[in-house]
Image: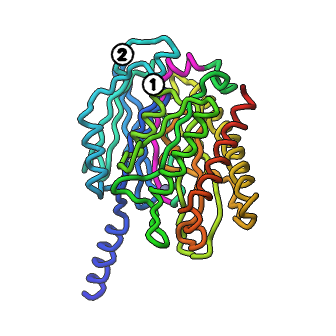
Amino acid sequence: MRYCTLLLLLMCATAHAQLNKLNRFFYHRGAITDNIGCYFAERPVVNLIPVRKVAENQAVVKFMIPKAKVSSAEARAAIDRINKEGRITHNAPGSQQLNQTQVTPWYKIQVAEVTTPIDGIMFQFSFDPRKVRITYATFNSIQQQPGVVFQLHHLDVLEQLKDHNSAPHRLAKGTRIVIDQGHGGEDSGAVGHFNIREKDIAYQVGAKVAQHLQHAGFTVATTRAHDVFVPLDERTTFANEWGADLFVSIHANSSPRPTTAGIETYFLNLPATVDVYTANHHNMSQQRQTWRDEQSAILAQNVHQLTLNSIHRNYPNVPDLKVKKAISQVLLGTNMPSVLIELGFLSNEQEAIRLNTTTYQDTLARGICDGITQYCAKYA
Ligand SMILES: [Zn+2]
């Protein structure tokens, strides 16, 4: 009897431990690739229910994440939104540059908590296999959040961009740069010594970078004009639809260790994706992704090095935390070379004080601008 109770308790405990919570959900619409990024409490297991071709222009693929539940109101709202939008149509991505204007329904997404065929969350994609290729990958993000990303690649657009994928295009004339000022509004980001908030530092430095870049002749947009909350997927969708050539996201760091200090720069490192529809095999999306990742690495190196150089002239002891590959929620959604710079640690008293001064911010902004300019000069 005691044994049975123990067994029952154990079974209950295991069942609860296995419940995987979906905490955050993003739908990054893009000119080339749309990304659906989901963040879970534990690394999700993805069961693929193979592609069923219904007609020449319609196939259905389902993914099951077993033992998963939506666990936040925010994620639930994002899922409701994507379900309600129903059939997603695209106003031909990059239409201005590519001279393509037709609106074509390309895919439809449904996300639901289901009990059959098994308990969990189901993602269903109905798509036109002539126009869309689907891939997915599981990963751990910068903050070690496990997740999965489903990617819908637009084959017509990739076909048209084919010749551009070996080198950046348009960098010579009117390069478009998005400066993404992290956090904002109710999302303060990290809050450090003296209540210095990441959202304010990111906003102030971002505004200075944008100003420098404009003076240098670039076409610049920022993702927020003041202290307002902007969802991550709106930031990336804006960059993608505006046809940005480069995307630079600005953040400040925090660590449980009060002595940790320094500058680090990230670029996207998406693990190899799994292709779910091989009948119409296409490697253009892989080429595009490889090109984007390579360029992001070079951009990160330039931005990081020149920011450090600029800082080291007056603050020689600021640690170089190097350029790192990682998954970040915002970088996951962009179609162009993209980097994320962490300006310093608000959890470090000395660095928090510096980050809050105009002089230090100016020095950072000048360095970031020089890094972007150096990267662009290579391709001008
Ligand atoms: Zn941040």
Judged from the image, the secondary structure of the residue bearing numbered disc 1 is: strand
Q: In terms of depth relative to the viewer, which is nearer, 45 or 201?
A: 201
Res. 83 in view = yes
Please, which residue is most extreme toward the bottom here?
Answer: 2
Left or right relative to 157: residue 230: left
- Tell me the residue at 44%/54% (across/down): 44
Q: Is 157 colored magenta in this rendering?
A: yes
Instruction: Give the amino acid at mark 1.
Output: Val
Check residue 351 for magenta coloring: no
Residue drawn at x 67%, y 23% is 172
Q: Is residue 217 above or below residue 49?
A: above
Q: Earlier in the sequence, mark 1 or mark 2?
A: 2
Q: Nearer the viewer, mark 1 or mark 2?
A: 2
Q: Residue furthest front?
A: 359
The stretch of residues the image draws in magenta is 144-161
Residue 150 appears in the picture as rendered: no
Q: Is residue 258 above or below residue 148?
A: below
**Which residue is pictured at 46% across the width and 12% down the height?**
100
- Say if disc 2 is inside 8 Å of ligand 1: no
Quadrant hosting residue 105: top left
**Local secondary structure at mark 2:** strand
Query: Measured from the top left, where is residue 77 in percent x and y?
Result: 26, 47
Which residue does the numbered mark 1 point to in the structure image? 132
- Which residue is denoted by mark 2 in the rendering? 103
Quadrant in which residue 104 is drawn: top left
